[in-house]
Amino acid sequence: MSTYVLVHGAWHSGRCWDRVVPSLASAGHRVVAPSLTGHGDKAHLLGPEVGLDTHVDDIVGLIVEQDLTEVILVGHSYAGLVISSAANRVPDRIAHLVYLDAMVPEDGESALDVQPMTRALIERAARSGTGWRIPPLPEAPPPLGLFGVTDPADLAWLRTMLSDQSALCLRQPVRLDNPAVRTIARTHIHCVAGVPEGIERRPVPAIQPNGSPARVRELPTGHDCMITMPAELAGLLLDVG
């Protein structure tokens, strides 16, 4: 049995994994899919002081408090930053990092460094009434839709779990200064359909930081693959475990 910790991306909540969790659990694995501070059942906690460090504390606290070990830590999109810093703090508890269509940072980088288009989001927040709230991205015409979701029923469900993001999440840097984090195996899963203009995906080096060959998988769908291709995503995650 493996333990999967599934970390959602910006604007989403832990509910976005609802279609993936049953497949992992039915295969005998433990699955935890929390909502980060400011989202889902914790939406009332959103404030300008909520940042990347807050979300790293969320995940590290969950892992330590529940005494989780041999964790397969999955981060979607923005949460690539979250799982990186979390693994840096508790590398002995992490068996595998999965970057799911995610930002993959180096030490000291923020979302602004990894995905420069996020600067426009921060500027958008600065022009808003609060100066720090970033609302979810607007829906685009197919095939882009809303985070790659275009089916009307799926869109309606997705909208129920979206909420504003704090700009500090995109400004705070990742910490990857623990040598032990480099020994953790990685898998990269890329969603390759309907990639929006301006999104830059860094090439995955042929050799992982731990010296083993890179593991890169692809799904022929948009960004929110846990909604549009949950069975296929679960299959890839089970292959990691």
Image (cartoon, grey):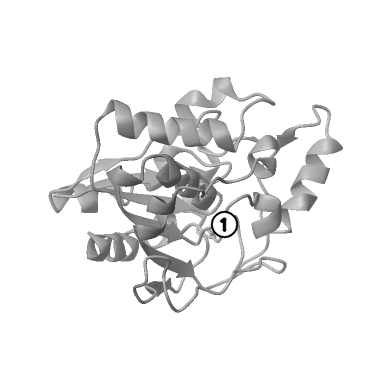
Instruction: Relative to 63, say whether 144 is above or below.
Output: below
Residue tagged by mark 1?
105
Residue 18 visible to the viewer:
no
Residue 127 screen position, x and y as percent: 87, 37
Q: Identify the image quadrant of residue 236.
A: bottom left
Residue found 55% across the figure and 45% down from its top: 175
Q: Residues within 10 Å of mark 1 (few under 14, many from 20)?
A: many
Instruction: Relative to 27, say whether 222 is above or below.
Output: below
- Please state which amino acid type lies under the numbered disc 1: Pro
Residue found 47% across the figure and 69% down from its top: 190
Q: Residue furthest right?
A: 127
Q: Is residue 235 left or right of residue 205?
A: left
Residue 222 screen position, x and y as percent: 52, 65
Q: Is residue 4 left or right of residue 180?
A: left
Residue found 36% across the figure and 77% down from its top: 213
Residue 75 screen position, x and y as percent: 44, 51
Instruction: Relative to 222, say whether 40 is above or below.
Output: above
Q: Nearer the viewer, residue 160 or 124?
A: 124
